[in-house]
Amino acid sequence: MSTMNRPYFHESLSQIIVKKDRAEISNWTESMELINEELQSLILLEKQVLGSPQWNQQLVAVQRENQFRLGALYRCERTMTKAIECDTTECDAYYLNTHEKNRNGYMDHVRNYVRVKTVFLSKVMERLK
């Protein structure tokens, strides 16, 4: 690959990938921190408007899953420096697979959260009519 086509021609391809992955993980963690804040508000709203133990349990379960995934992402972010040190394809594959698993987990979690939130807010709107 010529150096003219690479955006950071002074860095190796491995370094560029690690930077991209770090930025992506940072975006995910920021998004999940915002989801956590939103869940705190939704839990309070549930108590004030619905008072439903089932909805409370569901929102708390989503919040726990959010915290679990957030912790996993923070741990992954800390280990990213080891990815630069990889000198085998097996090592590279390990970090690539781990990143893809985190991406898929994040995306599944966000989809689930949006579904739960949408149904929950529709229940709140029904109650307020």
Image: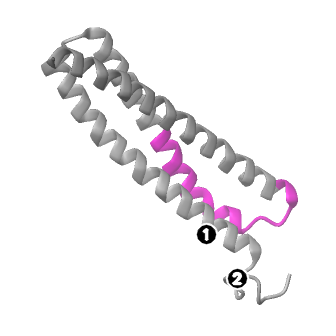
Q: Position of residue 66 (x, y in %)?
A: 43, 35
Magenta span includes 78: yes
Amino acid marked by disc 2 = Glu
Image-quadrant location for residue 104: top right
| Rendered residue at 25%/30% (across/down) | 42
Q: Secondary structure at mark 2?
A: loop
Q: Which mark is residue 19?
A: 1
Task: Give the camera-side residue of 1 and 129.
Answer: 129
**Label 2 to label 1, Cα distance in Å?**
10 Å
Amino acid marked by disc 1 = Lys
Q: Quadrant of the N terminus?
A: bottom right
| Rendered residue at 80%/56% (across/down) | 91
Q: Secondary structure at mark 1?
A: helix
Residue bearing mark 2: 11
Which range of residues does the magenta coloring cover? Answer: 69-90
The reply to whether callout 2 and callout 1 are in contact (CB within 8 Å) is yes
Q: Position of residue 96 (x, y in %)?
A: 73, 53
